[in-house]
Amino acid sequence: MFSYTFQWKQAFARLPVMLEGAVVTIEIALLSMLIGIALAVLLTGFRLSGNRVLSGIAATWVEIARNTPALFQIYMAHFGLGSFGLHLSPYTSLLLGITFNNAGYLAENFRGALKAIPDTQTRAARSLGMTPVRAFGHVVLPQMLRIAFLPMTNQMVWAILMTSLGITVGMNTDLYGVTQDLNALTFRTFELFALAAVIFYLITKTVQIGARLVAARLFRY
């Protein structure tokens, strides 16, 4: 017979602490995206450079990021590098693992976006007297961002959710880690994790709605 007694007051009393953890979650996800985008642009350049070595490095990165679990990538950052004497904090290991994953997925998104833009766009810009840099910045880049924007939004949502894996390397300052610690103190498992799930949901929905508004503003034409 069901005899569980809900005690929501205990969970809501811990809400300020959980929101502090949510800030850390957003911080890690945002940093991993910013660094991941920069690395993805670099990897995309490697893939399209025609240099076998650079192309091979980029292809290997993308293959590992896209075809191994994110948990494995975080473990390698924390325990793998630790085996070689490079001991990282749980925060840094989580950030490094998610960034590695983001860069791999985004690099493939960027490469696909660039492939979707006809070469005639660049040739037309060059025929108007633009330098290669200006042609890329004013003609190719806006179209690439338009194509890759929604996949970037999806990756941001995925990065937010991936932060919950930090608990496996001892991360306890993000939303999931804080919730786990509070659960160990209060044993209000259902209430605390239900509340954490709602916070995760609100964060990701805010990102998605915000992205749609930005896209409607920037990509109207």
Image (tube, helix red, strand yellow):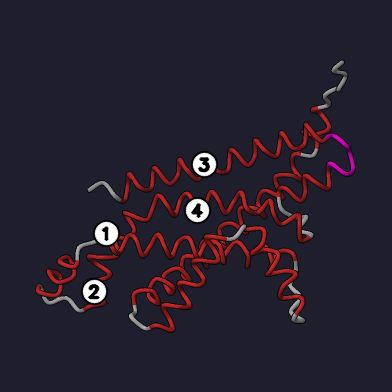
- Residue at which label 1 appears: 116
Residue ID for mark 3? 206
**What kind of residue is marked 1?**
Ala
**What segment is highlighted magenta in the picture?**
183-188
Which residue is tagged 2?
A: 134
- In the displayed structure, does residue 2 sit left or right of residue 212? right
Residue at the top extreme, as displayed: 1
Mark 4: which amino acid? Gln
N-terminal of the pair, mark 2 or mark 4, is 2
**x then y, percent, for residue 174:** 71, 53
First in sequence: mark 1 vs mark 4: 1
Q: In the figure, is residue 166 to the left or right of 2?
A: left
Which is more N-terminal, label 4 or label 3?
4
Instruction: Please tell me how many numbered marks the rendered image carries.
Output: 4
Q: Residue at x 68, y 69 (%)?
A: 77
Instruction: Give the residue number, with chain letter if any, for mark 4.
Output: 155
For label 1, the SS is: loop
- Please tell me whether mark 1 or mark 2 is closer to you in this view: 1
| Residue 182 percent across, percent down from the top left | 83, 44
The answer to whether mark 2 and mark 4 are in CB contact below 8 A is no
Q: Is 55 placed left or right of 3 in the picture?
A: left
C-alpha distance separating marks 1 and 4: 20 Å
| Residue at the image position 14 percent from the left and 75 percent from the top | 126
Residue 163, picture quadrant: bottom right
What whole-number distance in Å separates the C-alpha atoms at marks 1 and 2? 19 Å
Mark 2 and mark 3: Cα distance apart in space: 34 Å
Cβ atoms under marks 1 and 4 closer than 8 Å: no
Quadrant of residue 10 within the rendered picture:
top right
